Amino acid sequence: MTVHSEPEATRPEFTPGAPFVAAPAPPAGSLPRPRLWELLSARTRLTVVRAPTGFGKTVLLRQWVHRLGHDSERLVWIDGADAGGRHRLAQGAVDDTVLVWDHFDEVHDDETEPALLAALRRNPHLRLIVAVRDGRRFPDVLRLELPMSTVSARELAFQGSEMRQLFGLLGVQLGERGFDELERGAAGWPKPVHELAALLAARPAEASRLDEALVRVTRRFLRDDIVPMLEALSDSSWLDFVLASAVPDRLTEELAVAITGDERAGERLERLVAETMLIASSEEGEPVYRWRANHRAALRQEFEKRDPAGLRRVHERASAWHFDRGQAAEALAHAHLAQDWVAVVRTVEQYWTHLMYENYAETRTALRDAPVSVVSSSIAAVAIRDIFMLRWRVGDDLLLEAARASRLSEPHLIDTLPIPAWDRAITDATAVMIALRTRGELPLAQRFAESIDAALNSWLTIAGVPGIGLSSGALHAMLHVGITRTFADDHDGAVETLRRTYRFSPRATGDPSAPNAAVKTAVAYSLAGDTRQVEDWLGRSGDDDVEVWPVGALRAQRALAGALAAIESGERDEARRLLGLLETRTPNEYVWETAYVYAQARFDLVWGDRQLRLRELARERERLQRWLEPGSTLGPLVDSVEVELQLALGNGTRAHALLAASDHPRLLAPRALLALLSGGNDEVVRIATAALSAPTIIARDQTQLQALRAIAQARLGEAHAAARTLADALASAAASGARLGLAAAPRAELRQLAAAHGLGERLEAEIGGLPEVFPASVDVIFLTAREREVLRQLADGRTVREMADASFLSQNTIKSQLRTLYLKLGASSRARALALAHEHRLLDNS
């Protein structure tokens, strides 16, 4: 069966005075529409069937005339500008009839419509059913003086049941999902629905690509029917309005006026809704209009073909309108499509804090496409661009050059600026700080953090009441100062800033500021091993469903803090569960990735495969080296866990070689551990006493150093001092939850000391369930500076004679030094000595 959509038919001859003029037959297989026949059968004097072309007006009228209309009434059918119809009308020969006039838009004279209305007013027995495309003919205002009804595009559009019936008649099976897609995409427009049904009946395989077929037929309908219809209207501004209205994703009346300059935009939008072109909804009490996605795409394509410059102008106007209202994502999208690069940069500069979180992909693409010369006009845009470039694995020095030349890192710059300029300066400096941190330039990022912190303190002083007057941008800056300090080796500054951010953040439902600050505070404490604080701050952060972008990143940070806390408190299963959540993470900064690597290494130190983790660390160091450089928090933390992994495997010499490369305070605890395991008890007491007196010591190191010093003091015969130190260690572990530090000390000696001084129960309460991580002792090969030089010359392949000449020593002296070196290494040959030196990493710093 073939389905037609308003096909051409031979018009019947009109004979004046004839009692009945037959209408052309409806197309074979056209869908019966009884709900619409009922509307036409109503005894209304004037019925206007009003809809754009392609809505089935002619088919409907032919169906009604042939099925119902001529059963009991005298009926006249007139098609378009039929001369006979006008002749009959002029003779007054239409009285006591039902006059059906199709394609009335083809009547271009000014007399016919008034004559018909006069006949209706004069003769109460005359009915007129007329089909028109637009609202110029037979306007709705006529209902004030005549009984009038309208069959609109909304009624003519196919309902879901009708589309199912039509497709069923043709034997096309779509299924519920297919019909749902059809209802959303076709808007019930009869012509494209008919065409799609005919296409699928002829080519059933197309049903598997329904979305593509639907797009093709609807776009063709808009291009070949709707656009030409609008173009033919006497009011040519309609086509311009429709094309412009398809540019934004969503329209309000105000936006429509802004992009078209048409003060009648509201009326036009409602007209398009009535004709099922636009979808109307209400958002926050305001009417909002949308084109269906495929319709909008077709109209934009037509706009691009007809007037590309005009399309860009509409995008520019839309961008400016959204920018002025703080709608950053829309402003950026339209500026990008207009290739208005100045507007792109201006939008990124003003709204980057929102764009990075809410419209990441569009921001990335816009900055990639924007010319560098334009981006360079804004240091904030330069910074955001650099973040994206790092993720693209490409880069240049534009950010570093701009950051080093900028005054934004000066501590007291804010005091030289007028107060209205403070927010902009703080926001720009924050963008640079985040970009530098993302890049791994942590010392320079810390300089910007100090400058921003000084500016925020000035702001708080001016505000009078702490926290009052801080903008959301200022709170965002404060949060990122805390994050930067967390990873730039400033633990105390980090927790102070993050706690302050939490205190000043609003507690409104749905506001992410406080939960975000709480999670970041928990992370800072977790890197210090303070389990109690981690538990407290994770409790303040709310549940995992808090709406903070990016949700995946925030959950990963919660998991990171929780995993490190679980490791320090000896909760293996909980730590493994949380680390499992990190395996599917998508880190938004590599500095966080480095923290995840550290957490996994801490777990494997206690419960995992230590050899495998050392190999993984070597690979990760190469990938993440820039975030482990001097000035970072994670550099010394990763160093410390690598030393402890070597010690746990009994590799004292390798651990010693690693420690020789850095004197960072975070390495004092593993340095004291190496000293204890290699018998250097006096060295343990010296290191621990100095470290424990430092105000910057972190919780994990405090517990571990106290436990190690207690054992060293006991070995040295200082029983009472050892007991006091052990009691301090137990108190520290209880206060911070950092129980793992106690496991660094040899378990048997720890228990013996505790039992001797009545601390046994307290000790067991803290170390119960903790594995013994380290051996009782390790061997360390200590080489003198001269022995290292001899080893380096061996590695260079020099002969004894060459070594003697280079050192101005005799060959016998060199041979004696080699014998001593071989003895220390436990080697009997040059090859074996070099192999052992590589194994123990003695050549790393030679």
Image (cartoon, rainbow, N blue to C red):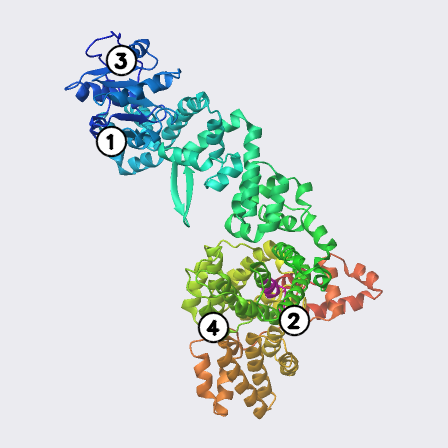
Q: Earlier in the sequence, mark 4 or mark 3?
A: 3
In front here: 731 or 706? 731
Q: Are marks 1 and 2 in contact (CB under 8 Å)?
A: no
Q: Earlier in the sequence, mark 2 or mark 4?
A: 4
User: Callout 3: helix, strand or loop?
Assistant: loop
Taking 446 as reference, is 136 above or below it? above
Task: Identify residue for label 4.
Answer: 536
Taking 112 as reference, is 556 above or below it? below
Q: Earlier in the sequence, mark 3 or mark 1?
A: 3
Task: Identify residue for label 2.
Answer: 781
- Which of discs 4 and 3 lies nearer the camera? The answer is 3
User: Residue 620: image x %, image y %?
Assistant: 57, 56
**Which label was assigned to residue 162?**
1
Question: In 3D space, how far apart are the residues under numbered discs 3 and 2 (Cα atoms)?
Answer: 123 Å
User: Residue 810: image x %, image y %?
Assistant: 83, 66
- Which of discs 3 and 1 lies nearer the camera? The answer is 3
Q: Earlier in the sequence, mark 3 or mark 2?
A: 3
Taking 661 as reference, is 223 above or below it? above
Query: Which region is colored magenta?
Result: 481-490
Question: In 3D space, how far apart are the residues under numbered discs 2 and 4 (Cα atoms)?
Answer: 45 Å
Task: Identify residue for label 3.
Answer: 92
